[in-house]
Amino acid sequence: MNERFLQDKVVLVTGAGGGIGRELALALAAEGARVLVNDLGSSVAGEGQDRSRAQAVVDAIRAAGGEASANGDSVADWAAAHRMVEQALDTFGRIDAVINNAGILRDRFFHNMSADEWRTVIDVHLNGTFYVSRAAAPHFKAQQSGAYLHMTSTSGLIGNLGQANYSAAKLGIVALSKSIALDMAKFSVRSNCISPFAYSRMIGSIPTDTPEQQARVERLQRMQTHQIAPLAVYLASEAAREVSGQIFAVRANEIFLISQNRPIRSLHRGEGWTAQSIAEHAMPALRASFYPLERSPDVFSWDPV
């Protein structure tokens, strides 16, 4: 019998009390990982606490013969992020991978968004990803190994309505992941992103006031959270030791490699440019290559397969 992908590895998963995070934790444990299950137990909007959610996942892992420990700290707190990593070390003796999955939503059209709605989402998604990743970094560096996996979203990679805070945070996570991959490559530490398509508690908050919104949610309901887990297991394992700095997406039974920003066209003018020559020559030449104001459903317009 082949050894399990993550035999004796220790993985910290944030936001693992339900949805995608729960499926990740269960799949990791089934492949031999000892899992620190973090979840504050808040609402989708980030309100309240319920530490029983993390413990329920731990109980499920233990019932299946695995090893796990619960943590109820907030990823949006620098000291709490360090406590998570210390708990993994105290409980299991090491840490091999961090999966940044915790998230909340405070959807609002940009022109109506409050400073608190902006700041709270940035704190959980972007700052939380930095805090937890940074807390693990000295240990990964010392042992000359480690894997980071961060959840991003097509809301940031492509765009979506009413999610300026979430979109900005999720695209920021992509840049953070690339920086981690570059800065820590010399320590054999890798960092990648997954953009998951799946119906979860957060997705369940999407409005269904219009036929278009209803159709979108119906498509999402056909994409299951457990379908994200196999790629996460692989990326956390030593089998992925040569994979770093990449952005993947999982949509039902599809796996995508997502492009990264590169120049697509250039123009040169020996005497330099003026506003007038840009208006008359540069923009007409570049316009054919402009990206339309597309949203994620416009780009992924076909049904999940």
Image: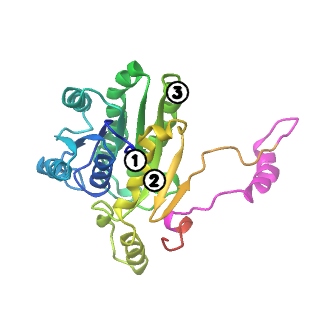
**On the image, numbered disc 2 is attached to which residue?**
195
Above or below for 154 versus 15: below
Q: Is residue 152 visible?
A: no
Nearer the observer: mark 3 or 1; the answer is: 1
Specify the amino acid type for callout 1.
Val
Taking depth in this image into account, of 90 and 158 the one nearest to the observer is 90
State which mark lies toward you, 3 or 2: 3
Q: Nearer the viewer, residue 121 or 98?
A: 98
In-image side of 194 versus 208 (left or right): right
Residue 132 tag number: none
Q: Which residue is mark 3?
A: 185
Residue 253, image x and y in percent?
Answer: 47, 65
In x, y percent, where is residue 157? 51, 52
Q: Residue at x 30, y 51 (%)?
A: 21
* Label 2 neighbour load within 10 Å: few <14, some 14-19, many 20+: many
What is the three-letter code of the residue carrying label 2?
Answer: Ser
Q: Is residue 86 left or right of residue 218?
A: left
